[in-house]
Image: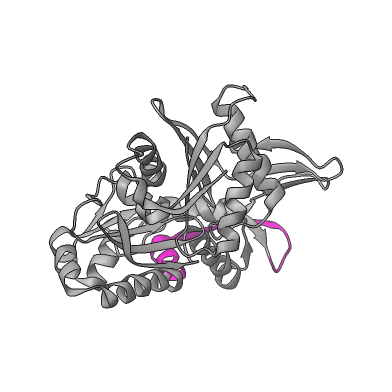
Amino acid sequence: MGIDLGTANTLVYVSGKGIVLQEPSVVAMDQNERIPLAVGEDAKRMLGRTPGNVVALRPLRDGVIADFDTAELMLKHFITRVHEGKTLVSPRVVIGIPSGVTGVERRAVMEAASQAGAREVYLIDEPVAAAIGAGLPVAEPTGNMIIDIGGGTTEVAVLSLQGTVLSESVRVAGDELSESIIHYMKKVHNLVVGERTAEEIKISIGSAYPTQDDEATMEVRGLHLLSGLPRTVTIKGPEIRESMSEPLSVIVDAVKRTLERTPPELAADIIDRGIMLAGGGALLKGIDTLISHETGIVVHVAADPLSCVVLGTGRVLENFKQLERVFSTRPSR
């Protein structure tokens, strides 16, 4: 079983079946009883809309486990659900994690998966898994560059011969882009909006580079700060792009820093082949054009950017012997 344990979404791949589960990484807990009421899509619908004794939690922050018990509950729920309720299943699990996490954070992920019923747990760095999932020839002695923009982290890596030559992990990604929209709405329009609304704005009219439909507008409902009453405001695409410019420049700087440190032979390969974009952030309009404009290198968006990491973990499971060298941590028994 391959798991992409993401800050925003968790995806599960089962050998021979493909991707069997794609759910938001959210758990709704009853605080008095300490029992989960809903996990995944049902819990996400509750974000910001729960009564006092119910909390909708995201157990992962910045790509790592922030709430161990809730993460374990969520993993257990997903593993059981994939196996149609059979509890005696103990699968071999490959989990994609950010390359910049510490040893303690790695152990927390392995521990949570073991507690959730896994027989063996292998960890693979997300950029490596994303590159395999996007179909890059990582086993060959050529330079491949991948940028994986997730919910909590952006991973930039140069890969060759089944290994990572250089990698940089910045904790700025989809969540920070949404956060910057929340701040902008509060500062400029005196309107308080929630996480879900900010994400809808980003998906509908957000862009990283001027596009043809720059005239797109959207009506946003929220709480007006001055009057304290609900209010509707109309916003335009360019102002949302401006509000996201700071986190976007952090991502672009990480790409540039990685390119500066790349050995010349591999840099030549990257110029030939281009850069591959994966992760949910790759779906932001114009982000490929922005990175291409800033670096002068062609940027391709993967065919299915959201599923790259989990497809990569699945491919590693199915070609376990050939791709054994890609694991970043040996299994825990």
Residue at the image point whose x is 64% and y is 36% from the top: 76
Residue 268: percent from left, percent from top: 14, 68
Is 232 covered by the magenta stretch? yes
User: Along the line of sight, which residue is nearer the eye, 47 or 201?
Assistant: 47
User: Along the line of sight, which residue is nearer the eye, 92 or 182?
Assistant: 92
Residue 155: percent from left, percent from top: 40, 62
Residue 281: percent from left, percent from top: 41, 55
Q: Is residue 233 above or below residue 92?
A: below
User: Along the line of sight, which residue is nearer the eye, 193 or 56?
Assistant: 56
Left or right of 328? Residue 304 is: left
Q: How many marks?
A: 0
Can I make out residue 232 in this image? no
Residue at the image point whose x is 81% and y is 42% from the top: 34
* Magenta part of the chain: 225-244
Q: Is residue 275 above or below residue 69?
A: below
Can I make out residue 206 in this image? yes
Residue 20: percent from left, percent from top: 46, 29
Left or right of 73? Residue 64 is: left
Quadrant for the C terminus in the image: top right
Q: Looking at the image, what colour scheme do you see?
A: one colour
Q: Is residue 147 above or below residue 306?
A: below
Is 2 covered by the magenta stretch? no
Q: Is residue 189 above or below residue 14?
A: below
Q: What residue occupies the far right of the structure in this picture?
A: 32
User: Along the line of sight, which residue is nearer the eye, 318 or 51?
Assistant: 318
